[in-house]
Amino acid sequence: ALTETSAICTTVSMCLSSLLFRDGSVTGHLDDCTCDVETIDAFNNYKLFPRLNELLESDYFRYYKVNLKKPCPFWNDNSHCGIRDCAVKPCPSDEVPDGIRSGSYKYSEEANNLAEECEEAKRLGAVDGSLSKETQEAVLRWTRHDDSSDSFCEADDIYSPDAEYVDLLLNPERYTGYKGPDAWKIWNSIYEENCFKPQNVKRPLASGRGDAHFFSGVCVEKRAFYKLVSGLHASINIHLSARYLLQDTWSEKKWGPNITEFQQRFDEVITRGEGPRRLKNLYFLYLIELRALSKVLPFFERPAFQLYTGNKSYDAEMKNLLLEILHLAKSFPLHFDENSFFAGNKKEAAKLKEEFRLHFKNISKIMDCVGCFKCRLWGKLQTQGLGTALKILFSESLIEKIPESGPSYGFQLTRQEIVALFNAFGRISTSVRELENFRNILQNMR
């Protein structure tokens, strides 16, 4: 089925090139292709989005451990946002389920003991000689995994005293008032210094440039990288427009869609043609992350894997919901074909893949330069989620070798990566859903 689909529609960017845009929203059938944006909207908005929302409200996925106090590694900047809506409220430790705080995510006693030994070994930075030889080898494999080159993100040290659990449901992503030179500096650094682009193009943030001109002479991998970053940027802007502070009085705050803000960022005329491309890139990002979810199913299907919080019956219920979502993702008929990535000369492909990984890792570090803590929280989570999706797509051969029982040393995901992966896709899924809301508002305004 994938081969047949790929023959009709090899890449998402080809499919989306013939979309019709009205008032910054994306509509229309796709020329010479079975895929269309309505198919994605219907699949996401009425099948996947409701289930995914339910999963993300569960205890396993709502608590994310993050260090918001790491200094910016690229420039001296102490201009932290003083706006009250930028604040993040960490969780008191006693509110976080015991199973999550223990660092364990399996129910069998043997698995729990091994996981605890591994975590302790990582904390100490050495293998305890009193452990059995088999356990020492397991710990070394675990440590090698953490130090390996498969990571696309600079992960937080979750054992740092500055790392705290945050309840994502109590700290939603929305408009905070963080804008101006500080916010512009972050995105400018991402695009200018860390995003593949033609050398003769100095300002990716500038509008009014056609795709054909902009991507002239740029290989498919570098085009994809730019589109992923642009899609993430577009998604964040949709969230800020959809949950805008509309009223702020002493008695109440009211958040809701701001159509003017949305149009300023995405309307074709106002953005001189750039807005529609941003929305195309959002759909490109959606399909990349959806593809990763479909590929990682074997890792989560193993009986040994549990969404461990300590509530056994509820955890089993949530795992069933998780598998339902992953099977649903796999059933999507028009998946992106990632086999076109890094398919040329092996030496050149390996070099490009490493360059790709390091560029994205650098972007994840830039998130520690974001002055607004709530923006930093969601920026770190979404870049780690996208980085995890890329890690999955580039680990297909390892995932295929995962045994049905026993540990998976060749491919591993930490709880942080799992929480980030699904919450990041939840943000993209929400953006696609919000586009329908904005489309309806704009139609009613005509």
Image (tube, rainbow, N blue to C red):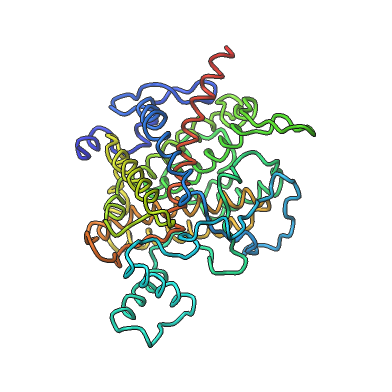
Q: Is residue 319 above or below residue 355?
A: above
Which residue of the protein is positioned furthest toward the top in this rendering?
446
Q: Residue at x 28, y 80 (%)?
A: 134
**Where is residue 283 drawn, in percent x and y?**
43, 36
Closest to the observer, 304 or 6: 304
Closest to the observer, 52 or 212: 52
Which residue of the protein is positioned furthest toward the right in this rendering?
250
Q: Quadrant of residue 356?
A: bottom left
Q: Quarter of the image for the N terminus: give it.
A: top left
The answer to whether residue 355 is visible is: no
Q: Quadrant of residue 345?
A: bottom left
The answer to whether residue 52 is visible is: yes
Which residue of the protein is positioned furthest toward the bottom in this rendering?
129
Q: Residue at x 44, y 82 (%)?
A: 126
Closest to the observer, 96 or 136: 96
**Where is residue 334 drawn, in percent x and y?**
29, 35
**Where is residue 232 drawn, in percent x and y?**
50, 43
Q: Is residue 407 above or below residue 49?
A: below
Closest to the observer, 178 or 61: 61
